[in-house]
Amino acid sequence: MIDEDMRAIIDSQHLCFAATVTPNGRPSLSPKGTIRVWDENHIYFLDIASPNTRRNIEKNPWIEVNVVDPISRRGYRLLGRAELHCADDVFDEATKQIFAEEETTYPVSAVVLISVERALPIYSPGYIHISDEYAMRKMWKERRTRMENKFESHIAKQGPYRPASN
């Protein structure tokens, strides 16, 4: 189910947006910065600071994860059922892998392991007038540089974001 291209997108991004359903039936979208491929049928992320996502999954396991490469302007919608893993082999293996890759640790409440039941591609409508992925990437690398410079100017004027100390 999870093919080489899906794996490449996930491995290059590590950021996704996960949609769950609240107990009162409302959508809840949350960014996750640790998305990884578990095996050919599963993906996972660490629940680092997501009590609402965890609570939603406990009530309703359905989840959709969107992973998009912002330069290629394409990615995947991955729909499935999530399981929460705490203090088990999945938890140990997943946290060990991510901590090693990122050379840091996080306070992890659970590992969210998703059994992918459907994977659909996401493509930008920009491909209507862009010849191929190389051209799309070239254009967006140039645009990203301008956008990053503009945001750097904003930060220089406003000052950098600093998390509130606990």
Image (cartoon, rainbow, N blue to C red):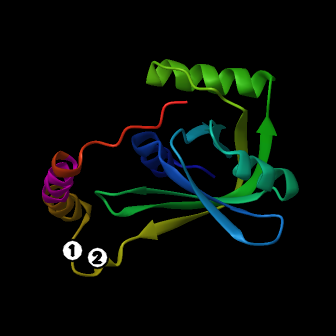
Residue 86, image x and y in percent? Answer: 79, 29
Q: Nearer the viewer, residue 97 or 53?
A: 53
In the figure, 41 relative to 72: above or below? above
Q: Which residue has dot 2 on it? A: 126
* Left or right: 67, with 52 as reference point: left
Tell whether 140 sits left or right of 116: left
Q: Is residue 129 left or right of residue 91?
A: left
Mark 1, secondary structure of its residue: loop
Residue at left 20%, top 61%?
140
User: In this rendering, which labeled residue sits more in front, label 2 or label 1?
Assistant: 2
Is label 2 in a helix, a strand or a loop?
Answer: helix
| Residue situated in front as seen by the camera: 14 or 32 | 32
In the rendered structure, which amino acid carries the disc numbered 2?
Answer: Gly
How many numbered marks does the figure carry?
A: 2
Tell me if label 2 and label 1 are in contact, CB under 8 Å: yes
- Crowding at dot 2, Cα within 10 Å, few <14 / some 14-19 / many 20+, comes out as few
128 magenta-colored:
no
Q: Quadrant of the C terminus?
A: top right
Kindly identify the amino acid type of the residue bearing the numbered disc 1.
Ile
The answer, for residue 39, to whether it is visible in the render is no
Q: CA distance from mark 2 to mark 1?
A: 6 Å
Q: Range of the magenta residues?
A: 144-155
| Residue that carries the numbered disc 1 in the rendered image | 130
Nearest to the observer: residue 62 or residue 20: 20
Q: Position of residue 16 (x, y in %)?
A: 51, 52
Question: Any magenta on residue 152?
Answer: yes
Q: Position of residue 49 (x, y in %)?
A: 63, 40
